[in-house]
Every structure is written in structure tokens, then in C-alpha cells.
Amino acid sequence: MIKSELVARIAERHPHLLQKDAERIVATIFDEISTALARGDRVELRGFGAFSVKPRPARVGRNPRTGAPVMVEEKRVPFFKTGKELREKLNGGIDRGEDED
Amino acid sequence: MTDKTVTRAHLSEAVYQEVGLSRNESAELVENVLDEIAHRLIQGETLKLSSFGTFTVRQKGGRIGRNPKTGQEVPIEPRRVLVFRPSHVLKDFINGKGPKPSERNE
């Protein structure tokens, strides 16, 4: 499924909404998540999952073609952890373990 | 870093401010978007959200694990896991190197 299909599905479930509003709703949700992560905040959606940002320290990498060392700057990477309820549903209602929320 | 936690309530408020529906309906819409995504993933579908990222369901085989505390062997059943792969746009934005994903022309 891609974003436009998600938008169409939401518009279908809420017939009084204009397609354009459904688009804005979906865009707003993912915008909010993105901006929260950019601030360094965590986004916790119970039952669904949590988005967070993990720091990756600077390191010396290598140009795979030449083998020359390259300095890789410190950076932050987005991370998603599946929520307990969704993890269970992916496995037919059974939580096959790993850590808790 | 402000280190706060954003929840459904914040997302609903943003939808309320942005679209001008009632607070109740905004909350319901946030829920429906998440439900729809979860539903598709449970069906095994991949969800691609351009300039945000991709959610994929991956099948993992069973293996023998070990309780790290006791060293005891524990079988780990085959299972399905959800993997999120952030887009480059999102990664750049989080590192202050690019525009907000929605403001980028695709």
C-alpha cells in the first residue's frame, strides 16, 4: 500500500470528507511524527508502536572502492519499535516474546 | 533535544488545528489511519509512505535462543516481525540537513 491508497481508504471510510482533507490528515500525522523526531522527542502510539531517535557516534569509515579512510560525522537515526498489541496481531494473537513496551 | 513524548493526543490536536474538524472526529481519524496501517501490515502487505519510510513485515525462522541470565536454552518460535526503514528524506530532516518531508517537492 502506498500513501495515496491510504488516503483513498480514509476518504472512503469518512464519506463526508473531501479527498483533499483526507490527504491533509494523513500528511499532518506523518509531519507531526517527523517534526517530533527532529526535535529529539519520542512518539509513542500505544498498541501500534513507538518512534524514537538513536544517536550514532562519529566513526572512521572507508570508501569501499578505494579503501581510503573517510570521517563519518555523528548522526541521529530514526527507529521504530513495534507495540505489543500489533506484534501479537502479526502473529495471530500470540506474543512470541522479545522485550516489553 | 527536548526529550518529550508525543502521543495520539498530540497527533489529534495537530489534525484538529490543521483541518478544522471537531476534536472528536480528529481523534477518530488518527485512530483510523493507524488502524488501517496495522490492518494492512497484519495482512502481510508492505506500506510505503514516500518521504517518511517503509513498513515491511518480515518472516523470521525459529531458532534456539538462550536466557541471558540463566544460560538456559529456550526455543524461539518462527514469527513475523515488523520492520521500519526510514526514508532518506526523513533521515536528512532529523539531522537538520533537509527540508521537512512534506515541504519537499517530489
Image (cartoon, coloured by chain):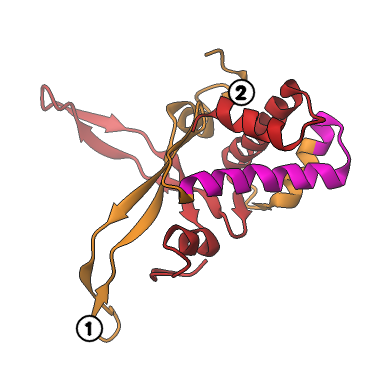
Chain colours: A red, B orange
Magenta stretch containing residue B31, yes or no?
Answer: yes
* B77 left or right of B52 in image: left
Instruction: Residue at 54% x, 48% y: name it.
Output: B39
Camera-nearest residue between B31 and A66: B31
Which picture quadrant has residue A39?
A: top right
Report the Cα–Cα distance between label 2 and label 1.
Answer: 48 Å
Residue at the spot of label 1: B71
Tell me which secondary structure the magenta stretch mostly adopts: helix
Q: Earlier in the sequence, mark 2 or mark 1?
A: 1
Q: Is residue A86 above or below residue A3?
A: below
Residue at the spot of label 2: B102
To the question of a shared chain for discs 2 and 1, the answer is yes
State the SS at label 2.
helix
In the rendering, at what x and y percent does residue A23 appear? 68, 26
Instruction: Residue at 47% x, 64% y: name it.
Output: A88
In the rendering, at what x and y percent does residue A97 appear? 39, 71
